[in-house]
Amino acid sequence: MEAKTKAKFNLMKQSSLAPEREDVSECEIPEAIDPTVRLMYLANEGDLEGINELLDSGINVNFRDIDGRTALHIAACQGRTDVVELLIRRGAEIDRKDRWGSTPLADAIYYKNHGVIKLLEKHGAKPLMVPMHVQNSREIPEYEIDPNELDFTNSVEITKGTFRTALWRGIQVAVKKIGEELITDEDKVRAFIDELALLQKIRHPNVVQFLGAVTQSSPMMIVTEYLPKGDLRAFLKRKGALKPIMAVRFALDIARGMNYLHENKPEAIIHRDLEPSNILRDDSGHLKVADFGVSKLLKVAKTVKEDKPILCQETSCRYVAPEVFRNEEYDVKVDVFSFALILLEMIEGCPPFSTKQEDEVPKAYVEKERPPFRAPAKLYSHGLRELIEQCWSENPASRPTFREIIKKLDAIDNHLLRKRHWKANILKCFGNLDVFWKNDHYSPSTRSSRFSTRR
């Protein structure tokens, strides 16, 4: 009896995202193989007639093998433009991902099969290759989170277009996404990578806690603790002007977080976007600094400079130091300038230069204008006004460090606390006298004793 002939299956090109690849030059496949596996083989070999015959017999064009790969993946790897066209025409899913997250287009891009790339893009394929992807699974960072663990079922938007809530391992978290597809904007990718690098270095009670990130699939995401009480901007909008003692306590929270960032070793961290919407409240009512999307590491040069002028559409112009708008080199003191404006807002109850349009504010700062002190002078007592004026000094070198700010705020807080205790004690004293007087005036025994004495 004649032995069955065997087909040779040359599958040298595999998933572009497989962490460890073994090139298989030649596999012998019996003719009597499973029809679904034969579909993969025929796609590899470019047998259009055989593919049509299999699909006509009812074989699923989107059959997936043990690695989650389809015939379209195979054809894209091999550069079989005609097979790709046929499979798409027969209903193949364009953006199906394999077990490593690779799509047919990602495979075609990896193997430089330009005809296939053009054809897939024509049919709407989206490139999902991630800028931070690693080729070896051992290089995947420890903080990597499987996107399937993030449940967005009841997600709500926290900040417009930036953060959303999600459930992760039973806890609610905040998730910042960078696009739903491949991000070709190099600035956005760089900002994401920079923010991720910074967050890994940070751990402080007054700075939002980094939990992990999704970097090996798209969309890329940063996952941080979720603070349900919202941001300082929303709080001030509801409450209006704060009492000085609360404003000082909040200011201390911000200053402690910022001091930690500025004294980070070996490189100081400049936030550069310190404003009320980027300061969050935790369950205990304390504040935490958040959102490091435009932050900078202050390296050997001790100063940094923006690559291009700042636009008011990109950030809130009301809290940014004038040297940034002048596109000059700057250092950590830009955060001190922003801090002064936030402290002023907490006491005044309205944003700095609230009567000016957003794009007019930078011009005012550059022309050495500062927001007016409209609240009663007593609310700026014990050196609070002087501290604000020092912090928004035109000369960055004249602005205090956050370590110095903390010392001054501690002293002001102690003054306000003593004043509060003194008032409380006075009221208590008057209350006791009132009670004593009432008891003395209305007690019958007291009256009779006085009468008997006079007799």
Image (spheres, helix red, strand yellow):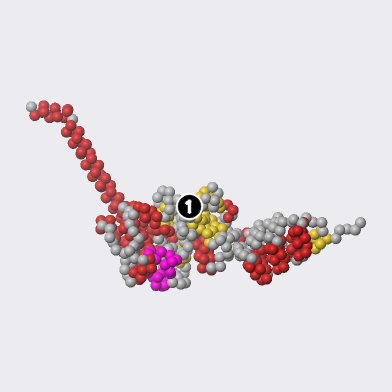
Residue 161 location in percent, x, y?
48, 60
> Which one is in front, 341 or 181?
181
* Residue highlighted by disc 1: 226
Position of 57 compared to 452: left or right?
A: right
Q: Could you tell me if residue 11 is visible in this image?
A: no
SS at circle 1: loop
**Residue 321 part of the magenta-drawn span:** yes
Quarter of the image with the N terminus is: bottom right
Would you identify the image quadrant in which residue 247 lies?
A: bottom left
- Where residue 267 appears, as percent x and y from the top left, is 47, 64
Q: Specify start and end residues of the magenta stretch as a single range.
A: 310-330
Residue 246 relative to residue 56: left or right: left
Task: Kindly report the secondary structure that dominates the magenta region of the rendered protein.
Answer: loop
How far across and how far down the image is residue 145, in percent?
A: 57, 55
Instruction: Residue at 72% x, 56% y: name it.
Output: 60
Is 168 magenta? The answer is no
Q: Quadrant of the C terminus?
A: top left
